[in-house]
Image: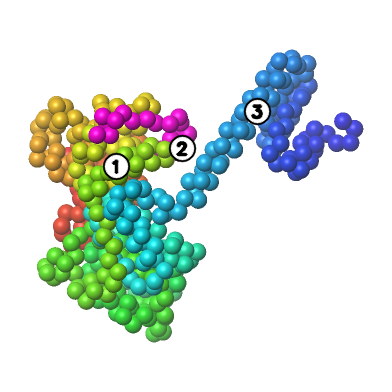
Amino acid sequence: MPAMDGAELLAEILKINPNAIVILMTAFGSIEAVVEAIRHGATDYVSKPFQMEDVLFRVARALKEKHLEKRVADLESQIQKQTAAQKIIGSSPAIKRLKQTIERLAPTADTILITGETGTGKELVARALHEASGRGAKNFVALDCSSIPETLIEAELFGHEKGTFTGATDTRGGLFETVADGTLFLDEVETLSSAVQAKLLRVLQEKVFRRVGGRVDIEFRARVIAASNQNLPEMIEAEKFRRDLFYRLNVLPVEIPPLRERREDLPEIVAYLLAKRSKELKTAKFKITPTTLEMLARHDWLGNVRELENVVSYVIALGGNLIDAADLPAQFQSSNPKIQNPKSDDKTARTLAGIEKIHILQTLESVNGNRVRAAEILGVDRRTSLLDLQRHIWFDGCHDGRANASKFRIKE
Ligand SMILES: Nc1ncnc2c1ncn2[C@@H]1O[C@H](COP(=O)(O)OP(=O)(O)OP(=O)(O)O)[C@@H](O)[C@H]1O
Ligand SMILES: [Mg+2]
């Protein structure tokens, strides 16, 4: 090689075609040069003198790897390209109607109120509405109203001027500014205090707001989508939610029915979850026996699709590519002694809290008490303190009925 050395040649080849497979031929003992070349994009190497069989084997292996890499990249880009509306799985009349409603309501600028039990897909629907709205390229800002302390929520929403309160060392824009003319998703809107409800109402009516301590009106141009898993009319009667705000938010109501009222969607959702999981885990396809599907379809799913997701994660974590009835958690096995032991008596097994508690305990058991792994399987990432998972039984999205209490905890 008179004109350039191996490293330079490698760089030139990859410049012309970054996907080229380069196998290096090296003199015995130049292992440092090999390491360097592989770091710079060579696929493999053979040492001189070489066996033709060895070379053929390495070429075949490199081609296979390349092929697989491309396949995975294709699949991943497909998943990424999937719109939120495409992620709403189901062909029941209720889901078909929901999808039509999304298409019809998305383009308007009116406020939407999404209601539905926990885990029915309110956030998914909010994203689908945003993507189909013509504001799709703009910001989608989701605020979980229950997760921000009362004292901070105003500054969080409205922003604040420098020096307004201790700690306000800078002027800072709030979410109303960040969202600009995108979509503002107010999740668990019923947890806002009545003072903040009143302020939100004013913004929706007057379409302007001020930073905390500010004197200038800032125009509010965002589309508001609110969501609640509570019965708002009942909360209004109990004077826990403002009637006037309800009417402002509820311009276009979207109600998502619970999974148990559209059981025919269950097999399709399970298939989707299994396919998604096998792609994520880069494993072979999962299969499920018809009996297992029937058992799942009989369940009441008080935690809706999220609960179903957790159960699917649970059975997958148990291993095996064929999912059988015996793999299901104890609450599906009516004759399973676990359900009857004193720790999980009948009452526990029937309530949502009880089922989740049993499920969490079983998940913990199935991973030998590894909390990180258990949290992963349970999908309780963003708001879960792992310490809590250990000390309490924790779960996401359940309400214990008290105002502003968004987390449901049961001591073990
Ligand atoms: N029809 C569906 N098809 C596929 N996945 C769904 C469907 N409905 C919900 N999901 C999935 O279930 C999970 C829960 O949905 P989401 O977070 O939107 O529920 P939610 O109604 O906001 O619940 P919560 O009231 O507890 O906040 C998400 O992972 C979502 O992608
Ligand atoms: Mg939600």
Camera-nearest residue between 401 and 182: 182
In the picture, measured across the screen, residue 192 lies left or right of residue 275, that is left
Provide the residue designation for mark 1: 266
Residue 207, placed above or below residue 229? below
Name the residue type under label 3: Ala
Residue drawn at (32%, 57%) of the image: 98
**Circle 3 crowding by C-alpha within 10 Å: few under 14, some 14–19, many from 20:** some
Camera-nearest residue between 22 and 395: 22
Front position among marks 1 and 2? 1
Mark 2 secondary-structure assignment: helix
In the picture, measured across the screen, residue 234 lies left or right of residue 329, that is left
Residue drawn at (70%, 20%) of the image: 56
Name the residue type under label 2: Lys
Provide the residue designation for mark 2: 279
Distance of label 1 from label 2 (alpha carbons): 20 Å
Where residue 360 appears, x then y in whole percent?
A: 24, 38
Q: How many marks?
A: 3
Residue 154, placed above or below residue 57? below
Q: Which residues are magenta?
A: 277-294
Residue 284 sits inside the magenta stretch:
yes
Distance of label 1 from label 3 (alpha carbons): 41 Å
Provide the residue designation for mark 3: 62
Where residue 17 appears, x then y in whole percent?
A: 73, 41
Mark 1 secondary-structure assignment: helix
